[in-house]
Image (cartoon, grey):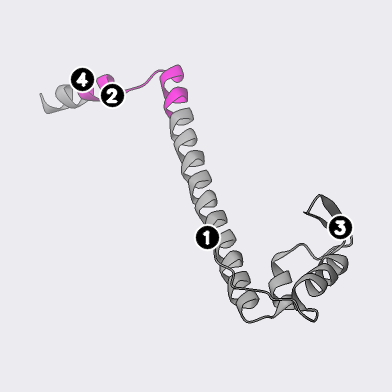
Amino acid sequence: MKTLQVDRLANRLRLSGVELLLCMILLLGASVSLAQAQARGDDDSAIRSVLARQVVAWNERRLESFMEGYWRSPHLSFFSGGKKITGWDATLDRYRKNYQSEGREMGQLSF
């Protein structure tokens, strides 16, 4: 008798090939969504960390450390005041000229 009941239950729980495939797709989709959410969280955390380090560096007047948050490349494009500056070194020079030359003030940075 118990064997018959177990067999009936097993038959009820058996999935057709299509149902099994749909379940697998749902589980895979949930896994991918979870992984993407985790990656977004990691990205947000990494970005916030860079910005926090930039705030500290700026407020300590350490422009080279501040610039570590930028892509160190001659192909960096920096836009300010309607002008485009190309390159990491040129961007650092612009910061030095506008914020550290005589009579200039850096002020306090916060995000």
Tag of residue 13: 2
Mark 4 residue type: Arg
* Position of the N terminus by quadrant: top left
For image coordinates 67% across by 80% down, the residue present is 61
- Does residue 11 belong to the magenta stretch? yes
Q: CA distance from mark 1 to mark 2?
A: 43 Å
Q: Earlier in the sequence, mark 4 or mark 1?
A: 4
Q: Earlier in the sequence, mark 1 or mark 2?
A: 2
Which of the two discs, 4 and 2, sits closer to the camera?
2
For image coordinates 69% across by 80% down, the residue present is 62
Query: For mark 1, what is the residue?
Result: 45
Residue nearest the viewer, comparing 65 with 2: 65
Label 4 near label 3: C-beta < 8 Å?
no
Q: CA distance from mark 3 to mark 2?
A: 66 Å
Left or right relative to 77: residue 42: left
Q: Earlier in the sequence, mark 1 or mark 3?
A: 1
